[in-house]
């Protein structure tokens, strides 16, 4: 079978992006990887710098990450401008490629043995639970081992995607970070046969619109911040602090999902009290020098609060596909082409991968509650098979019918992308689909998870709990001291 050589753009050089690049390259596809940051690693890249805080509130996905800069369009004024002409270059770099949410003591909660990618074992002696820096090194070594590094354009942000005829037009901006031209930007326009969006979903911080929260942030900007800006426990060790409140122990984005994705109580530090939701923040009084009271939905008042960390998660945001956003619609009212409504899910994807109206646009890395490294690699294998011509997606009508059935079964919002206790079944469906066409197309057959992997995956929760119990000694978990906090759902 003759296959026409394809040229594909991959957006993002985290684990989803480098896995996609590796398997596309192996399938004979020409690729370019666009990465706005200066290194590979994605969500597992630790950067001591803190991102610029989001708007308060931040509930509109279309503007929650960044607003595209296109050549020939007037750029809006920047907060970091000096005298209206010279940009503060450090601030501009933060805006262009904000550091991710990784903090100094971040560790995985799924064992490394379940996150080993094909043909790339972890270094001998690697423990089951490791620091963020170890995971970043693993992703970068994977990229180097499969010769993906030369294909990555660092400091390059995709601004806009649009389909023109049979090609995808990709508009991007390169930010020069060093030398006499530091701060200069170069705009480019290129054409591709397909696009893989592997940009992750931990960029656009979600900040709820609670009464009084905006006023607290304006009055005490250093005492109220999103968890994306958290870096080190020393930030919370001030002994004059009476109480710290962490908003968002629930791993969900809507009340309809309440309870389904709560952080298990046995994972919460023993010196943490979990209470009900927030009703309002007391409006600051003139001259008030520090935050005060928070009223909960059950009427309880948390008095004398000193610091608030907003751990309410992130919005799905595709700023380079803003034409496929509609902030005004609820998920239930999404039409057959829209990708993002309220930011709680990505719409109109077949198997959380292929854009149903046009499968030459694919996504890798969307599902939640999985052994991410291995799961995303299987998605990348499926994308490579399709883009290289070794597999075909079902008809649009068949994909639409399967999507409708999934919506009926799983509902809307974050739950829609959950693979909790379902990764093996999902992977098997991808493997069976690709392999069913391999004899006809000449594609390579894929092996699914081993029985050993499957058996170990059943022990993820108890194994991690045992690890936590072994580390909790003197309020120490992982590499971080755990402050005494009140966790608000």
Image: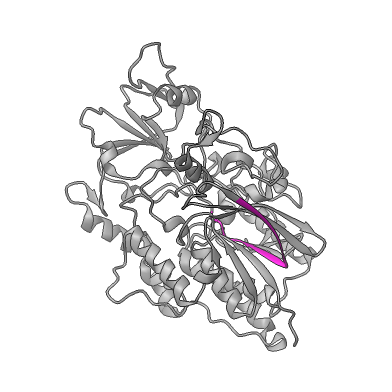
Q: Is residue 104 above or below residue 21?
A: above
Q: Does the magenta segment cover residue 187?
A: yes
Pick the front one: 484 or 402: 484
Q: Residue at x 22, y 56 (%)?
A: 471
- Corner quadrant of residue 306: top left
- Please provide percent x and percent y for residue 42: 47, 58
Q: Residue at x 39, y 68 (%)?
A: 138
Give the main secondary structure, helix, strand or loop, of the magenta stretch: strand
Q: Does the magenta segment cover residue 205?
A: no
**Location of the C terminus (image quadrant):** top left
Q: Is residue 385 above or below residue 464?
A: below
Figure label count? 0
Q: Is residue 24 above or below residue 73?
A: below
Question: Magenta part of the protein: which range?
Answer: 186-200
Q: Residue at x 22, y 52 (%)?
A: 472
Q: Residue at x 68, y 73 (%)?
A: 387
- Corner quadrant of residue 290: top left
Q: Is residue 313 above or below residue 167?
A: above
- Please provide percent x and percent y for residue 17: 54, 64
- Please provide percent x and percent y for residue 65: 56, 44
Left or right of 253 in this view: 356 = right
Inspect this view and state whether residue 422 appears: no
Inspect this view and state whether residue 455 appears: yes
Pick the front one: 282 or 254: 282
**Location of the N terminus (image quadrant):** bottom right
């Amino acid at each position: 079978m003759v296959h026409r050589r394809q040229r594909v753009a991959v957006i993002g050089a985290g684990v989803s992006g480098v896995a996609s690049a590796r398997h596309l390259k192996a399938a004979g596809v020409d690729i370019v990887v666009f990465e706005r940051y200066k290194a590979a690693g994605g969500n597992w890249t630790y950067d001591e710098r803190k991102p610029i805080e989001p708007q308060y509130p931040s509930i509109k996905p279309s503007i929650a990450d960044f607003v595209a800069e296109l050549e020939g369009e007037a750029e809006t004024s920047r907060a970091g401008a000096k005298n209206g002409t010279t940009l503060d270059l450090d601030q501009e770099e933060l805006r262009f490629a904000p550091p991710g949410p990784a903090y100094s003591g971040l560790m995985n909660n799924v064992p490394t043995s379940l996150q080993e990618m094909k043909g790339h074992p972890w270094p001998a002696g690697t423990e089951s639970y490791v620091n963020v820096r170890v995971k970043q090194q693993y992703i970068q070594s994977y990229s180097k081992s499969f010769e993906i590094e030369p294909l990555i354009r660092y400091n390059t942000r995709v601004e806009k995607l649009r389909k023109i005829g049979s090609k995808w037009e990709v508009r991007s901006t390169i930010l020069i970070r060093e030398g006499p031209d530091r701060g200069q930007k170069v705009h480019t326009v290129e054409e591709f046969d397909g696009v893989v969006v592997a940009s992750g979903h931990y960029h656009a911080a979600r900040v709820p619109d609670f009464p009084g929260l905006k006023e607290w942030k304006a009055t005490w900007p250093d005492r109220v911040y999103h968890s994306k800006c958290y870096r080190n426990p020393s930030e919370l060790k001030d002994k004059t602090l009476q109480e710290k409140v962490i908003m968002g122990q629930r791993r969900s984005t809507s009340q309809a999902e309440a309870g389904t994705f709560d952080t298990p109580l046995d994972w919460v530090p023993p010196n943490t009290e979990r209470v009900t939701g927030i009703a309002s923040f007391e409006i600051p009084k003139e001259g008030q020098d520090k935050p005060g009271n928070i009223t909960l939905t059950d009427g309880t008042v948390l008095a004398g609060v000193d610091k608030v960390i907003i751990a309410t998660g992130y919005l799905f945001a595709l700023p380079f596909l803003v034409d496929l956003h509609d902030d005004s619609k609820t998920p239930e009212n999404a039409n057959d082409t829209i990708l993002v409504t309220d930011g709680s899910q990505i719409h109109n994807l077949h198997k959380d991968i292929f854009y149903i109206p046009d499968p030459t646009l694919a996504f890798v890395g969307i599902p939640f509650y999985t052994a991410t490294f291995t799961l995303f690699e299987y998605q990348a294998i499926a994308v490579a098979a399709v883009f290289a011509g070794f597999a075909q997606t079902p008809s649009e009508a068949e994909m639409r019918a399967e999507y409708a059935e999934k919506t009926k079964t799983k509902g809307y919002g974050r739950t829609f992308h959950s693979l909790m206790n379902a990764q093996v079944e999902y992977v098997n469906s991808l493997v069976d689909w690709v392999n069913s066409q391999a004899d006809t197309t000449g594609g390579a057959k894929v092996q699914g998870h081993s029985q050993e992997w499957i058996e170990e995956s059943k022990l993820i929760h108890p194994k991690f709990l045992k690890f936590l119990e072994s580390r909790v000694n003197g309020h120490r978990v992982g590499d971080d001291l755990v402050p005494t906090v009140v966790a608000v759902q």
